[in-house]
Amino acid sequence: MLEADQNDSGRSGAPVVGFGGLLPERLLRFRRPLWYQELLLIAVSYWLYGQVRNAIPNKLAIAQKHARGVQHLQDVLHLNFELSINQFVAAHEPIAQVMDYYYATLHFIVTIGVLVWLFVKRPALYRGARTVLFATSGVALAGFYLFPLAPPRLMPQYGYIDTLLKFHTWGSLADPKIAQHSNQFAAMPSLHIGWSLWCGLTIAACATRTWVRVLALSYPVATLIVIVSTANHYFLDAVGGVIVLAAGYGIQYLLSGHGAYESPVGSPALMPDEQRVNAS
């Protein structure tokens, strides 16, 4: 389904011109990633991310004040459509259930799936793309700390309905067992958007078939609809997610001196597994 972009052959092994990145050249040269190292790195990094995220103080009054400010700004910008969409979805249980389970599961499943696909099929691009994802999450932590925000579902006085709570969906952050291990106010920026857009852009950059690219880029759009419909995020949270992802790409470029989807110096022109894809 996903085919290798043969344009990599024009970049592979090419000398670095101009800005060469902040990291030493020996760290920028291609090395095939080792699965056990990557598994450990991802596990430890996500654990640290969770510890830092959940250690940020839960300041209800400040988070609600910020939420009122976000709603006011969206009113001024005529972006105040979340409430009507949320109430419509909450009135139709089948739609709400689908969106609730989408919200609770695909955020992790699709992201991990794209990482695994890159590791197996596009190892030359894996580290750059992975660095973007890590950097994005790191920048988001700063947002969670500096701007704690009560999501719409925690502002029922404005008419928002927590669909995950209403329909007793698995994974609801209103579940005390889950809530005590999760920062309820880590909403700005939305990493559901940051991660889903990373997935869409990564697949689109690696695919050659138009329908695959369209499908990939529709994923963050669907995610936007879901996070708003289930009252888990404001629209401006999604804007924040796009901004931190852009920062993630910028950090990756500063470190390496090349784009996230460009093969590093010393990488083979075409990996064996990519040759099999092209031959099929």
Image (tube, rainbow, N blue to C red):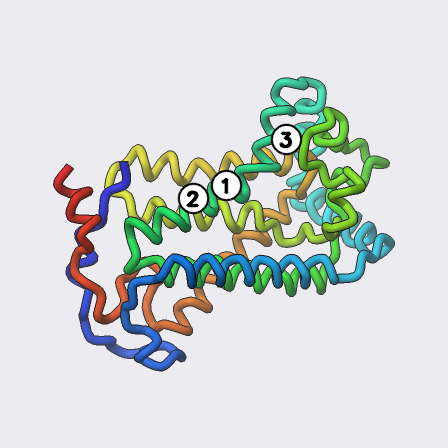
Measured from the top left, where is residue 146 in percent x and y? 71, 64
**Between marks 3 and 1, how big is the CA–CA gap?**
15 Å
**Image disc number at residue 276:** none
**Image disc number at residue 113:** 2
Amino acid beneath label 1: Ile
Measured from the top left, where is residue 124 in percent x and y? 28, 60
Outermost residue on the left side: it is: 279
**Between marks 2 and 3, how big is the CA–CA gap?**
20 Å
Name which of mark 3 and mark 1 comes first in the sequence: 3
Name which of mark 2 and mark 3 comes first in the sequence: 3
Amino acid beneath label 2: Gly
Which is more toward the observer, 267 or 83?
Answer: 267
Quarter assignment of residue 147: bottom right
Look at 68% across and 61% down and name the residue there: 51
**Between marks 2 and 1, how big is the CA–CA gap?**
6 Å
Above or below, 163 relative to 15? above
Residue identifier under label 1: 109
| Marks 3, 1: nearer the viewer | 1
Residue identifier under label 3: 100
Measured from the top left, where is residue 224 in percent x and y? 56, 39
Amino acid beneath label 3: Asp
Which is more toward the observer, 260 or 179?
Answer: 179
| Few, some or many residues within 10 Å of mark 3 (<14, 14–19, 20+) | many
Q: Left or right of 110: which side holds 154? A: right
Label 1: element kind: helix
Look at 24% across and 76% down and name the residue there: 17
Above or below, 57 relative to 191? below
Which is more toward the observer, 215 or 58?
Answer: 58
| Few, some or many residues within 10 Å of mark 1 (<14, 14–19, 20+) | few
